Image (tube, rainbow, N blue to C red):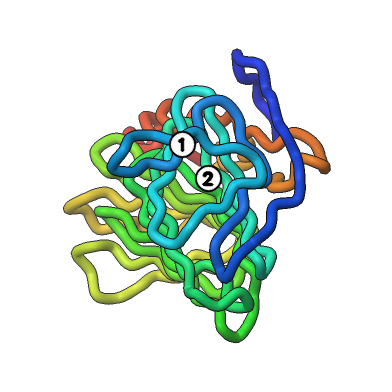
Amino acid sequence: MRIVHHFLTILVLCSPTLYAADAGVVAAQGDAFTVNAKGDSRLKVGMRVNDGDTLKTGAGGLLILSFADGSRLKLKENSRIVVHATGAPEAGPSGIELTYGAVFALVSKHDKQHFTVKTKTAVAGVRGTEFFTSVGEHDAFWLCVEEGAVDVTPADAKVAMTVPKGLGVLVEKGKAPAPPKPYAWTKKLNWNFDPNQGDVVDHTAIEAEYKNLLKQKYD
């Protein structure tokens, strides 16, 4: 699914060398940085991303990471995450902390894999699947599943709900989430993680969709 962005897309491709369970940058566009005490350092294709690194994209930014086990992460523009790796290449990434923005995750399925996305509002846990998650206005948490299933636990709850393929869930602070259901706007999402297979930029206007979601104007 494709929608139009108002900027020039520049993708530089190569095959990064991966170390341990750390990630390599396979696509970088616009403002894509790693954040450290010395300031922001621009990320380029082929660079290594280490366990514990904070990454962020700005307006028009895009970042795709590839792990040794085949797992991939794609950050939309205006997003910020902390990457966590397991230390064993075959186990892949162990998860991310999502502060704001949106991330697509393609998590390889194998015995040693358990991947989590932590936010202020909810935690998502998976074992091999493909899903999209974002943090919007007032820390509203949105997740939808393209393949497999994801267990979502709201911050103020002890029991997880399972979100299966084709469904999504919205979790707002202080409110009990509705059961998972299909959302029409998620059909617009661009699930492509491979620049060699075409456009990887997701052009969905997440904040605009949130306004509809929070007003319960969705299908």
Front residue of 200/10: it is: 10
Front residue of 206/52: it is: 52
Residue 144 lies, with reference to residue 150, above or below; the image says above
Residue 109's quadrant in the figure?
bottom right
Kindly identify the residue that appears in the image at 36 percent across and 29 percent down. Answer: 211
Image spot of residue 16 (x, y percent): 69, 52
Left or right: 190 as drawn, with respect to 174 = right
Kindly identify the residue that appears in the image at 75 percent across and 50 percent down. Answer: 15
Front residue of 79/181: it is: 79
Q: Is residue 212 visible?
A: yes
| Kind of element beneath mark 2 | loop
| Kind of element beneath mark 1 | strand
Residue pointed to by mark 1: 33
Kindly identify the residue that appears in the image at 44 percent across and 35 percent down. Answer: 41
Residue 198's quadrant in the figure?
top right
Q: Is residue 217 visible?
A: no
Q: Residues within 10 Å of mark 2 (few under 14, many from 20)?
A: some
Image spot of residue 162 (x, y percent): 46, 70
Residue 144 lies, with reference to residue 195, above or below; the image says below
Does the CB distance between marks 2 and 1 fall below 8 Å? no
